[in-house]
Image (spheres, rainbow, N blue to C red):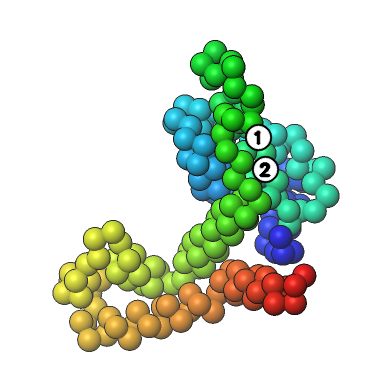
Amino acid sequence: MRDDPLVIAMVNRAARGDQGAWNDIIERYSPLVWSICLRYRLDRQDSDDVGQSVWLLLVERIGMLREPAALPGWLATTTQRECLRVLRASRRHEHAELPDDQLSPDPGAAMIEKEILAAERDAAVWAAFAELPRGCRELLAMLLSDHPHSYEDISATLGMRVGSIGPMRARCLDRLRQSPHIAAIADGARDKQARGERGD
């Protein structure tokens, strides 16, 4: 993983007992933990158990992480192990005759990296969105909701002229693209592409 200064700072602060940093880590990486639980087809209760175990293990070991930027990979690997532990425990009697490696497929490094990158991207977008001015957040939320609102609805709700919605939308999206959170993700993607082209 790239050395994301935001992740490094969060890990270092959390290791010193900063509750805000812990909250940020959990908010940022809970979707990653859940996505891995879903891949292993765990039910809600087992997923909750895995999540609780993963966060407790992180509390115990965060000070021992050699590379703070490797936190997403540590979380993904730990979540996988916890999912397998839960599956083995729940299927011990059903699959007593099967070897452990047949209980669940190994997703491989590529799948884990894809999930980590998706979690990082989603966290960056939400962090950038949260820093937009209130008017931009309200406008983009209405435009990008599951059931997008018409310009007439937006005009009535936000008190904007219909003709100003498009230009404001463009300005808000431009601010979003210029966020340091988005830039960090884009830089990481460019670095990865450059390494791939060099064959690193």
Q: Position of residue 162 (x, y in %)?
A: 20, 82
Q: Position of residue 196 (x, y in %)?
A: 69, 72
Q: SS class of the residue under badge 2?
A: helix
- The answer to whether 85 is drawn above or below residue 66 in the figure is above
User: Label 1: which residue?
Assistant: 81
| Label 1 Cα neighbours within 10 Å, binned few <14 / some 14-19 / many ≥20 | some
Please tell me which residue lies in front, 34 or 141: 34
Which quadrant of the figure has residue 6?
Answer: bottom right
The answer to whether residue 108 shows anywhere in this view is yes
Q: Residue furthest top?
A: 93
Q: Position of residue 54 (x, y in %)?
A: 64, 36
Q: Would residue 13 be found to the left or right of residue 149 on screen?
A: right
Identified at 54% across, 43% down, the residue is 36
Quote the CA–CA distance across marks 1 and 2: 6 Å
User: Label 2: which residue?
Assistant: 77
Q: SS class of the residue under badge 1?
A: helix
Specify the amino acid type for callout 1. Arg
Specify the amino acid type for callout 2. Thr
Identified at 29% across, 69% down, the residue is 143
